[in-house]
Image (cartoon, rainbow, N blue to C red):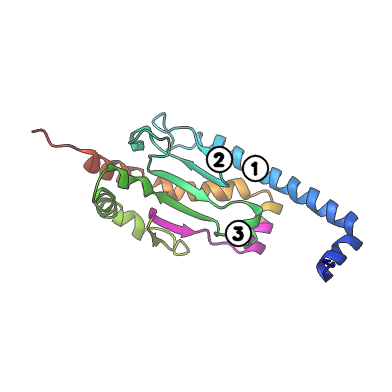
Amino acid sequence: MQRLNEIEEFLLRNWGDVIKIKENAENLQGKVDKLCEEICKKLQNKDWWSKEFENPVYKWNDIFFWKKSWHFGRDWLDIVCFSVNAVSPNSLMGHGEDKPNACIWTKRVTKLGEGKKEKFEERFNVYAREIIKSLPSEIKLTKDPECAFIYYLPYTPEQWIEILKTGKFVDTILEHFDILAQFIEPIDKAMAEVLYKKKK
């Protein structure tokens, strides 16, 4: 017969508090969800936004969007997109599988054919070179097999608590989309080269 371990006994002795904590954790996740939905709406008011973009999506604790011209396949995720990821309370507090990050997602470009993803990223890096040089020093771009680049949002769990406490979460995430938006033109140019087909 299985016996209670020390943790289980502790939980039972404090069951009322356990239920309250669980309910408040769910409420907190709900608040973050609503903030992310607000971000999706406010992105469309940015001065760099245009009708060429599809409406932002909040899914899997990620916020992402793309230009219609960056969609190249039958599946809705056959895209190149701007994405801010892992914005759940779990990840913000350092307990998720991934840390909050921002990226230009390019994984599906491989579906265009052999060498297409490599060509896209090579041309993108050429067009984006000067923008990358001008980024703030705290933005550390790294390579990732699924992205043109990725960087982790430069905040500690304690800083995230302060950002949420002071009502700055929406503006903070929007600032990182402003950084990503600087790369609209380089993506346009690189995609045009990858998709271009010479006439016979």
Say if residue 1 shows up in the picture. yes
Mark-to-mark CA distance, 3 and 2: 18 Å
In the figure, residue 135 lies in which quadrant? bottom left
Q: Earlier in the sequence, mark 1 or mark 2?
A: 1
- Helix, strand or loop for disc 2: strand
Relative depth, front residue between 102 and 167: 102
Q: Residue at x 79, y 52 (%)?
A: 22
Mark 2 nearby-residue class (10 Å; few <14, some 14–19, many ≥20): some
Residue farthest toward the left in the current orientation of the protein: 200
| Image side of residue 68 versus residue 94, left or right | left
Tell me the residue at 17%/37% (across/down). Answer: 197
Question: Quick check: marks 3 and 2 in contact, CB under 8 Å?
Answer: no
How far apart are the alpha carbons under marks 1 and 2? 8 Å
Please rate how many residues cluster around mark 3, counting C-alpha atoms within 10 Å: few if below 14, some from 14 to 19, many from 20. some
| Residue labelled with disc 2 | 58
The stretch in magenta equals 146-162
Q: Report which quarter residue 79 is drawn in.
A: top left
Q: Position of residue 48 (x, y in %)?
A: 42, 38
Residue ID for mark 3: 96
Question: What residue is rendered at 61% in x and 57% in y?
Answer: 91
Q: Earlier in the sequence, mark 3 or mark 1?
A: 1
Residue at the spot of label 1: 33
Q: Position of residue 107 (x, y in %)?
A: 38, 49
**Local SS, label 1:** helix
Vertical relation: 134 (above or below) 107: below
Contact check, label 1 and label 2, Cβ < 8 Å: yes
Residue type marked 3: Gly
In contact (CB < 8 Å): disc 3 and disc 1: no
Q: Residue furthest front?
A: 1
Depth-wise, is mark 3 or mark 2 nearer the camera?
Answer: 3
